[in-house]
Amino acid sequence: ALLPGLIAAHTSPGFPSLSAVIMTGGTELPAPVERLLRGMVIPLPVIATDHDTFDTATRLSAVEGRFTPAAAGKIDTALRLFAEHVDGQVLLDRLAIARTDVVTPLMFEYELLDRARARRRRIVLPEGEEPRILRAAEVLLRRGVAELTLLGDRERIAAQAAQLGLDLDGAAVISPFDPELRERFAREYAALRAHKGVTVELARDAVTDVSYFGTLMVHLGLADGMVSGAAHTTAHTIRPAFELLRLGLVSSVFFMCLADRVLVYGDCAVNPDPDAAQLADIAIASARTAALFGVEPRIAMLSYSTGASGAGADVDKVREATELVRRSRPDLPVEGPIQYDAAIDPAVAHAKMPGSEVAGRATVFVVPDLNTGNNLYKAVQRSAGAVAVGPVLQNLRKPVNDLSRGATVADIVTTVAITAAQVRDDVPAGPVTSGADVALSPGPGR
């Protein structure tokens, strides 16, 4: 008769986390209890055995925990312990591995997680009651990638974690209705948006939205970055960041993980039709993001023609943007206008643009507009089997990144690591960029 109460208590906050319930001595459940259990969602295994308690405990003590490819939790813990206690660079130096400027997907993932672990940034996850977010949170905590704050109802999150068999010890849980933080955030948001007619009374309602609450945590230094979008639209996720954290023109990149390299595509998600100056800004920001994640930036300013072979408003915009990049950042290798085949294929580059240091070797591809960019990344993703990581937002004072609503647990882990690695210590806290609000496009259909 204790079994239903034990199972119900397992999903309650503060109750010890159980792996299974074992009934010894050949115990048979009374019929009413069995009917009750059949009507419950049982979040852990219940095992019945004919052996007595002592014999069962003895047999269990002899069971070895095996390290198999399917033991995800053990693998994550082992990777964290290796990263914390083994100097990987010393091992690489002793192996005398040849260096290359090509970043493979495996190298990208390893260096990304390694960089995030080294800095242990505080990341807020507004969708704290979403099962994929909770599963990703466990992986991130096991691997020591970041310190996490989950937004949501504490009891519901605890019950969800227990039902999924997750260990979320170490993650902070905050309700967006926390009275003290709600009032503090409302006054801050009202002060920042007073020019838009926002009062403290209106702000009290606005800040309980998890995207605004999480962004205000980042704005006020209670978190270093935010990742959301598994259950919300792109516009819902990033609008608060545009209002509160914008430094200049906000743009984005996708990291395209091909079989043998990682490329950077910008901007495929935010700006519908940038002018030449904005395009140059996107190129410079994309190069900075590429370098931050170990991809040596060689910028291709994409167009429908290469070099001086074409004319027209669209290609002239790209040509002007290329010159602006060269004047502003003469240290950055940039080529444009250039077609995609000439930018990526050495043989085509030799024919169309011989002698270029970028043609045939480009790593950063800047598209002329959102229509081109969104179709380009999806075509490569589907046709070449590439993994598209992003969009990763640029030109925010502190990082906020959006997830696809179809994001997998692995996608969420990677995006949190990217966000942690994006945090810049050289960007001071302060007011958002003044000027007109950005009119958000709906974002790519993902």
Image (cartoon, grey):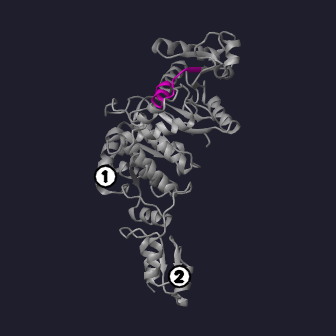
Q: Is 295 colored magenta in this rendering?
A: yes
| Residue located 42% across and 64% down the image | 158
Residue 214 % position (x, y): 40, 47
Image quadrant assignment for residue 118: top left
Residue 375 % position (x, y): 66, 33
| Residue located 48% across and 35% down the image | 393
Question: Which residue type carries mark 1?
Answer: Leu
> Is label 2 in contact with label 1 (beta carbons under 8 Å)?
no
Residue 185 % position (x, y): 32, 47
Given residues 361 and 85, the one toward you in this image is 85
Please tell me whether mark 2 or mark 1 is closer to you in this view: 2
Left or right placement of residue 107 versus residue 259 in this view: left
Q: Is 60 colored magenta in this rendering?
A: no
Q: Which residue is mark 2?
A: 49
Q: CA distance from mark 2 to mark 1?
A: 51 Å
Question: Which residue type carries mark 2?
Answer: Thr
Residue 331 % position (x, y): 46, 14
Span of residues in magenta: 287-300
Left or right placement of residue 298 versus residue 211 in this view: right
Alpha-carbon neighbours of circle 2 within 10 Å: few (<14), some, or many (≥20)?
A: some
Q: Secondary structure at mark 2?
A: loop
In the rendered image, the quadrant that contains the C terminus is top right
Alpha-carbon neighbours of circle 1 within 10 Å: few (<14), some, or many (≥20)?
A: some
Given residues 428 and 36, the one toward you in this image is 36
On residue 181, which mark appears? 1
Asked whether residue 18 is in view, the answer is: yes
